[in-house]
Image (cartoon, coloured by chain):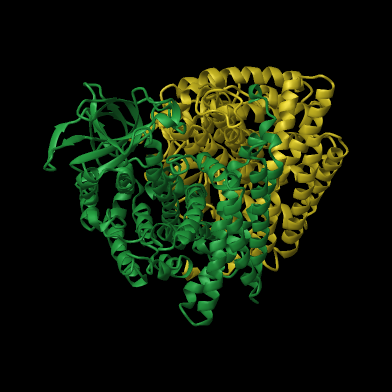
Chain colours: A green, B yellow
Amino acid sequence: MTYRAPVKDMLFAMKELANIDAVAQLPGFEDAGLDTAQAVLEECAKLNEDVVAPLNWEGDINPSFFKDGKVTATPGFKEAFDQYTQGGWQGLHHPTDFGGQGLPKLIHAACQEMVNAANMSFALCPLLTDGAIEALLTAGSEEQKAAFIPKMIDGTWTGTMNLTEPQAGSDLAAVRTRAEPQPDGTYKIFGTKIFITWGEHDMAENLVHLVLARVVGAPEGVKGISLFIVPKFLVNADGSLGARNDVHCVSIEHKMGIKASPTAVLQYGDNGGAIGYLVGQENRGLEYMFVMMNAARYGVGIQGLAIADRAYQRAVAYARDRVQSRPVDGSLPAAAPIIHHPDVRRMLMTMRAFTEGCRAMALVGGAAYDAAHHHPDADVRKQNQTFYEFLVPLIKGYSTEMSLEVTSLGVQVHGGMGFIEETGAAQHYRDAKILTIYEGTTAIQANDLIGRKTARDGGQAAKAIAGQIEATEQALAARSSEAAQAFAKRLGAARRAFIDVVDFVAGQTKASPNAVFAGSVNYLMLAGNLVAGWQMGRALLVAEDRLAEGEDAAFMQAKITTARFYGDHILTRVPGLRDSIVEGAAGVTDMALEAF
Amino acid sequence: MTYRAPVKDMLFAMKELANIDAVAQLPGFEDAGLDTAQAVLEECAKLNEDVVAPLNWEGDINPSFFKDGKVTATPGFKEAFDQYTQGGWQGLHHPTDFGGQGLPKLIHAACQEMVNAANMSFALCPLLTDGAIEALLTAGSEEQKAAFIPKMIDGTWTGTMNLTEPQAGSDLAAVRTRAEPQPDGTYKIFGTKIFITWGEHDMAENLVHLVLARVVGAPEGVKGISLFIVPKFLVNADGSLGARNDVHCVSIEHKMGIKASPTAVLQYGDNGGAIGYLVGQENRGLEYMFVMMNAARYGVGIQGLAIADRAYQRAVAYARDRVQSRPVDGSLPAAAPIIHHPDVRRMLMTMRAFTEGCRAMALVGGAAYDAAHHHPDADVRKQNQTFYEFLVPLIKGYSTEMSLEVTSLGVQVHGGMGFIEETGAAQHYRDAKILTIYEGTTAIQANDLIGRKTARDGGQAAKAIAGQIEATEQALAARSSEAAQAFAKRLGAARRAFIDVVDFVAGQTKASPNAVFAGSVNYLMLAGNLVAGWQMGRALLVAEDRLAEGEDAAFMQAKITTARFYGDHILTRVPGLRDSIVEGAAGVTDMALEAF
């Protein structure tokens, strides 16, 4: 089953929802309008459909493997990676100064979806390299940028993020990896890092590890953490590779999914100390790492909708092909392809509506990021930054949680065949489960949403979004169509529930933290559901207009139906979540610890 | 991590919700009261905790394997199976005439939960044998019963169910396996059966395949299907094993989960025809098979809550052990076990509330089955049969769907460790996914609920249950406690939503089948949620009484909190489902087939 990149839906969302025309008016993005996007997306689709996607199943049955400190990637991965980087895809949204293409995040996001839908294990390598590049762009010295970024963009080297240690997962305050300052200005790094994605492999000449460590004598907790570059091979002044650094992969994990992506345990300093270079200032490591993490969190959200789309496409193909039972309405005289059965359609629509809603949310977020970084007006930048920051936990948290439901439905559509590995649906189900965990679990995203994004400003950013949603609601209510009317009702109920919850969170976080945090993930799911649904409501409005104008009737009609489905089947979950959050804390907080 | 059978909660549900005292008044069950139940459950717990549970992970890493037509079970399984059958567990609820213990289904259900929680792959072998025994008890001749049942009960032989063929999964009308009548009254069977659980193995001397096939010249469709016994080895008149029959395992599947349970492709008649013995009358096979299937569907529902409980126990153990981050309320000065964090508690409570609710629903259903089969009064039997039949699709459909959510949360509680196979949480997640598929997918259960259980009697059985729920609601509303008041509100909202949906289904199934069936699975989820929630409401009432009487305060308080959680976090999903069902068909039915 081949992957087909959803270029048309991506361009629709870019043009009609994320307003790519406005992005193309930002300084530096003058050439990045819809035509460019279309050309880039079509090119990207080719590579991912033809080269990357066919390796997905291969990666599952022939995972990367570890032997004697070395990791060998799945056969074919290195060649695909070479094509990927040589095609300029690693540098798509990075600065032209360092060999990148300098395109907006909006366009990059769509390309990122494609490579992840094609092959999530594969895509993780560029994703982590992106994070490393972002961190160096933010905090690296000019020498560091010049030495490392171009080679990461051209694929000669790749990057990693080294945060987790056995005792320090969600809680980075517990990081113990030690950095000892040396007379020459470098540091010697000692410690163990785990869960390092693509932390060792044979697809690139060198690996650039970005490592959180604590300089000897630094304060306890998160305020004593610094960020270091620790290359696998030291780099000579002329850019050539020098000595092997004292960082070694001691094992990789045996995981439920993304098996082709090696998850390494890295040992630093067992032979005298790994040489590391401080990035930025001492003790500000976490701040820099958050730059990487925010880029990576957005990227993981994209992974969620990407794998959802792949699962959807696979399920549709099977449902068209598999013949079983007569339609329940008697409309056909014999057994029919199961896509005729209402519940199969319901499952497919659930998958599709979730995916399209999350795609729209992510692309709207991508455009906000672009405006936040490139708009000439500081107020507009700030406004967009606030909006983007509110969206990141939703894009990460909601899109990945929904991907669990979607990939489960993907298996379900296949019936018994779905449980057989060779069918391929099960791989998506297994792969997706990491998405709600890494780069901050859903609960960590939810804490971010509650703490930094809602309670801190007393719910202002949230209320501003609710105001925009209300405008969409009014536009829908003003329409005469049944679909728009129905959607307006759902959106209104969901928005009012959201406001209740925001008031609860803003009002109670200090006084009753346990009660508020008991509802944190439900709040995230509610807000994600609403914001993605809002985009579907906007899409419905546009699609009705385009339909009236005679543009692409089949696409627009499908968009209207998908939006309506989202309203009646997904937005309808929101009021119940409100009740759980605002009135449901006792069931969580009253339980005696011993009683579990 | 060891499994601990939840004997206390089982006995609570048996005594207080399923009314085991009434079961013990049924003819033949005079000795099957609470004391017997307790003794049996404690004995059963020992075997499953000590012998069966430790083999669960072993089965995953060392699955049954196929070579040269033979299947070798996971090391240790045969010895455990011998202990299981020699302990009398296979015959627990089967008639004493054939070597069984003759205990009620109510007690058997709890034991079934234990073996499935301990090791689902292992438990499938007795589960399928149970189904075969039930079918023979219903439709077999006296000679067939005498020849086969005692040896299946004592574990010398095991049973299988052969329904599925490549073109006939959910749609049994498409069965093509052929039966040719022979002059001696036997039949020769030809065809291919797939997905045959424990269809070949080395744990028993013989396998008794119950096979659906079509006698040459029989009508098309489901009315031309007959049921046959096809033993792996023919059985001589003296009961000894005779010639090898012409049924052969040609492969087993490579599955996402339940890897220790061999899923066989069986080839019948490649060497002249497999000898089969007709069970009952020709062309009534599907009717008999439904007896097996109903027993098996109930059993699969039990599997759902069993694996949910296992996942819950594992997650609790990890959450008590894993130290990470300070509590958000500042109640501890340093990082704490994650069970202190509100969202971890919310996840654990979700797992627990689902499991306890589904356990109560299943045990109440088990008691209804016992009354339906053993009560002296025909009206009472009929009433209980109707109730039981309404419950079977809920027990199967809802308990298995919830197990997907629970096992996913089980992984999530573990964070990154959950994705590492050695942790064990991932196995439950992978294993559980089969449960919503086999013995009739969730959609097949939902069709049963809509067609045979709701539309056919115009919603009468459903309304009768709603009436009983209303009585519970009134009892809750009459209490002064906050927990009871809160629960009454949720239960009332859910019951009213249920009635709306029942009216919609009863009124529209004929006129608008597509619209009704578009909501079929949502209706099943709504009804299962409500009926399990109703049991939690009843449990809350009892627990308050027992608490007032001074009985086991910790247990009763935990039950009250768990019930309250169910009300505020799970029953709250019901009104939204109502909206999707009653008002959401357009989003499913309007989509053009080509647009998917």
Quarter holding residue B46: top right
- Image location of residue A349, percent across then percent down: 53, 60
Q: Residue furthest right?
A: B478
Q: Judge by depth and name the residue closer to the eye, B29 or B472.
A: B472
- Image location of residue A477, percent across then percent down: 66, 71
Q: Is residue B86 above or below residue A129?
A: above
Question: Who's the residue at 66% across and 39% down the image?
Answer: B138
Q: Is residue B290 above or below residue B216?
A: above
Q: Quadrant of the N terminus of chain A?
A: bottom left
- Image location of residue A184, percent across then percent down: 19, 29
Residue A102 visible in image = yes
- Image location of residue B305, percent across then percent down: 61, 35
Question: Who's the residue at 32% across and 57% down the image?
Answer: A93
Q: Is residue A111 left or right of residue A467?
A: left
Q: Quadrant of the C terminus of chain A?
A: top right
Q: Residue furthest front?
A: A378
Q: Is residue A485 left or right of residue A393?
A: right
Q: Is residue A97 left or right of residue A11?
A: left
Question: Who's the residue at 70% across and 61% down the image?
Answer: B582
Residue B220 visible in image = no
Q: Is residue A227 above or below residue B585?
A: above
Q: How many marks?
A: 0
Q: Judge by depth and name the residue closer to the eye, A312 or B277.
A: A312
Q: Judge by depth and name the residue closer to the eye, A453 or B467.
A: A453
